[in-house]
Image (tube, coloured by chain):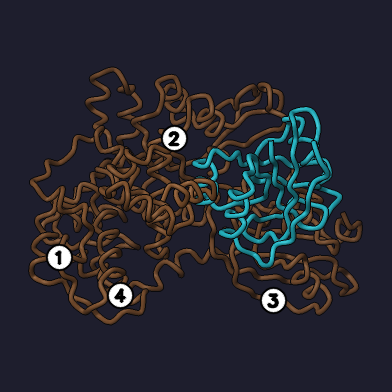
Amino acid sequence: MNDDFSVHFPAVAVGNLLDSIPHGIAVIDRELKIVLINEFLEALTGLALADVKGVYVDFVLRSNIAQRGRTFREVLASGEPLVIDGDIVSRDRRKIPMQFTLSPLRGDEDETVGLVIVLDDLTAVVASAGLSADHDQTDSIIGQSPKMREVFDLIPLMAHTEASVLITGETGTGKDKVAEAIHQRSSRAAKPFIKINCGALPESLLESELFGYVKGAFTGAVKDKPGMFRLAQGGTLFLTEIGDMPLPLQVKLLSVLDDREFFPLGGEKKIKVDVRIIAATHRPLKQRVAAGEFREDLYYRLNVLHLHLPPLRERETDTRFLLNHFLRLFAERTGNSAKTFSDESLALLMDYAFPGNIRELRNIVEYCVNICQSRRIEVEHLPKYLFSRLSPVAPPAPAALEPEARTMQSPASGKDWLAIEKDLIIETLTQTRGNRTKAAEILGWGRTTLWRKLKTHGLVNAPELSNTKEAA
Amino acid sequence: MKILLTVQDNSIAPRFDQATEVIIAEHDGRRLTAEPRTIILPHRSAEELSDLIVKEGVQCVVCGGIEDSFHKFFTWKKITVIDGVIGAHAEAMDKVCAGELRPGAILASAKQGE
């Protein structure tokens, strides 16, 4: 590290100051090596300052603006601040749009001794770019039915308390979005919002992800890992699929919620945490308590505030409202002219049960907008799998929803349909362990259609392709 | 095992989708079976790089930050991904051959290279 730097800026004082700022901040020296990163950036990158001090900045930021350091060197040379838009790849493998502000740091004799890089998350700006201001929506949660109005009224109330929140509702009802909306409207908004899926990881891994470990705690623990509780310090920890958390971990979670402190794996020193917990599940927790699969005491500890998100079939007027909303949104995004649903296609959609709720509805509308070349969306423009399910669909039991949930988890806002379709195929094939027949069944396509789409998306190996040609 | 490392100068490239150079090596479980090959990519494209990885029959990818969709794609293709690696590619290669490289590893060489 550049010695000049530490003379001008004592690390401890600057570090404390930077931790109080709700943006990712990195301080680098003239050699473009990390001097300091604040806690916010640690949470974003999953990298601890102690590990990355002295490391070249772009290995830490993982941005697309560095151009092998040229951008930073130009600011150092010119001494002029620079604001530039780009993105980073975060700890949880998300590409996050960012505005980078690069400002020179000056020493006593006005010489440039380094740079301060401030990262401003543009996700909200980018996400809302296609949405109009509307009183029937909170952030990106939309609805006008009485049940959703109740939810909208409750969100600010829940945001202004520190109590734990339990969000329940079927898959695709927007539990994640509500949790984020509560966090964004709370006094913790400037601090991290960390999400962890309790159903996605095996018990031992989940424990180390949540509570962290110390170096030497087990084979392979070659350095300290802070864990999600510490990364969410001062902010909100969102535990999704809490109903799937293994029983032994439930005990440890309850203890942390009660005492606000815990021992990391293999650690001898208690860590104090100030984290608000929001939990969500699509499983009936009360029944799981009765069956001995979920601890009663933890249930009551989490269930201080309870918010139930109604499924779409109970939201009366919302189906029509949401169809129109997404139709307008995707038509604008794709640059297509305004489209409408024909009476027949609208009647079919209104009769459909949407077991995947809003996620599914949104996917269907995006499909239609991309497939339909005329102004009116007719029945033939609707996804074919709807017709096999149009016979009255009973609301699925929560546990049985899982495969459906996985098939519908792909749509990330801002992606076009082809990208969503590709993600959907990959996710379904992962779920079926590569079994194409089963995947085709889940997706509601024939095997040939799936094969054609695999080829379209470049998901077929060259040897497989050549075998097919030879066979033909 | 065929290993691919995304590189930038002497280091593992910070991002998979920004990499313009890769090294491909083959390892028989004890040592490299041939001199590693360096391939310069015509431009930055995560999609084209993924195609290359599949076509080359790579079994292990070592890289920096990678988006979840590509990570899932490789997992589905039964390709091991060791991502989030920071450090010199030579050290990463030694470690991966010895079976000692883990995702998120910050190698000893990380503080020397740019």
Chain assigned cyan: B
Query: Of circles 4 and 2, which is in front?
Result: 4
Structural distance between the alpha carbons of marks 2 and 1: 38 Å
- The secondary element bearing badge 4 is classed as helix
Chain to which the residue tagged by mark 4 belongs: A
Describe residue A62's horizontal placement relative to residue A341 as left or right: right
Q: Position of residue A448 (x, y in %)?
A: 32, 50
Q: Residue furthest bottom?
A: A337
Residue that carries the numbered disc 2 in the rendered image: A200
Chain assigned brown: A
Q: Amino acid at mark 1?
A: Val
Within-10-Å neighbours for mark 3: few <14, some 14–19, many 20+: some
Residue that carries the numbered disc 4 in the rendered image: A331
First of labels 3, 2 by sequence position? 3
- The secondary element bearing badge 1 is classed as helix
Structural distance between the alpha carbons of marks 3 and 2: 41 Å
First of labels 4, 1 by sequence position? 4
Query: Of circles 2 and 1, which is in front?
Result: 1
